[in-house]
Amino acid sequence: MRKLFYILSVLSLLLLNHTSVFAQEKKLEGSITLSGAWAIYPIAVAWAEVFQKIYPKVKIDISAGGAGKGAADAMAGLVDIGMVSRDPDPSELKKNIQAIYVLKDAVYPVISDKNFFLEDLLRKGVKKETLSEIYIAGTITTWNQVVGQKGNKPLHVYTRSDSSGAAASWAAYLGKKQEDLKGVGVYGDPGLLEAVKRDPVGIGYNNFSFVFTREGPLISGIRLVPIDSNENGIVDSDEIYETRGQAIAAIEAGRFPATRKNFFFIKNEPRALVKEFIKFALSEEGTKIVESVGTSLPIPKEEREAILKTLE
């Protein structure tokens, strides 16, 4: 709630200087419904807050519940927009679904800052193969195996119980699908983060928007497991992310391996009002809102402009 209050405060400041060309062009009215990914939710709320103040006769209803819910609701025609924080499945596109790329972010392996092997993990990192053996094969069951030491300290694996973009993206990074991930299922990003924070031998994964504070540092009580991408057996300086700035730089440079795209799922041709909302989200003004809120990253201008042309 504190993060959402901050977001709305930032948006209020933006509105004081607001001179939208959208408002000058036409008056809109009606309702729009969205549901889905936790990762997209804060930005969608922010877009909606500004859009509704520009157009007071528009009502936008948004609910989180995971990317799977967003995809299912969109395909069933229960919402205008499904928020899906993973790549669309070919089977979904066959059901008259149009997937519109709107944001990008990343998924990170997360542990408690009380983890017994934190010093070793921050020095050596973890290879992709090791993460696969933890989450897919299930052959690594102790932290001693992870860091290459003798002993039998258990490793508690946590995953998402709901159909989610974070889980799908994490599984895709490991070459599989969400249903292949092992671990104790926990609902939602907040729940999974809290489970790992409380467990000094736990490991989970979370969206960019849930591991960093808006001010920059990591959320209190957690650390990100460095992924040894070049597999040199040590953690290089550009493989450690302790602030939002470091993480953003790695995502933008393509250095962090578990990045992903976020989408709006639309069934059939979107209504005029829905189309205007999507255009606003991808506009320069919508991009400024993304940057101000800071829970996701905007997509490059060239890509946004290409997508906007398809909506004309």
Image: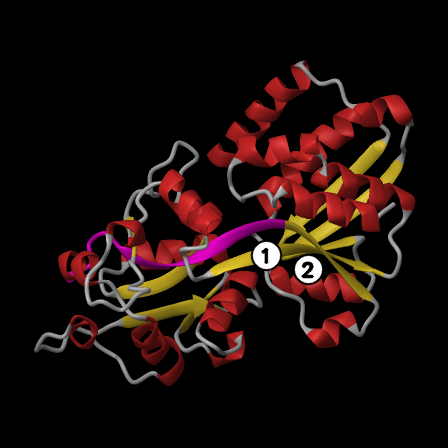
Q: Which amino acid does label 1 sit on?
A: Lys
The furthest residue to the left: 150
Which residue is pictured at 14% across the width and 75% down the height? 148
User: Depth check: 69 or 110 in front?
Assistant: 110
User: How far separated are the C-alphas under marks 2 and 1?
Assistant: 15 Å
Residue 281 location in percent, x, y?
71, 39
Relative placement, left or right, of 40 versus 254 is right
Which image quadrant is residue 54 in? top right
Q: Is residue 81 above or below residue 86?
A: above
111 part of magenta stretch = yes
Q: How many marks?
A: 2
Indicate which label's residue lies in the foreground, 2 or 1.
1
Which image quadrant is residue 246 in? top left
Which residue is pictured at 21% across the width and 76% down the height? 142
Q: Residues within 10 Å of mark 2 (few under 14, many from 20)?
A: many
Element under label 1? strand
Q: What stretch is highlighted in magenta?
A: 103-117
Mark 2 or mark 1, earlier in chain: 2
Residue 156 location in percent, x, y?
29, 71
Element under label 2? helix
Residue 70's mark?
2
238 part of magenta stretch = no
Q: Is residue 209 above or below residue 289?
A: below
Which image quadrant is residue 11 in? top right
Residue topped by disc 1: 261
Magenta stretch prevailing secondary structure:
strand
Residue 192's mark?
none
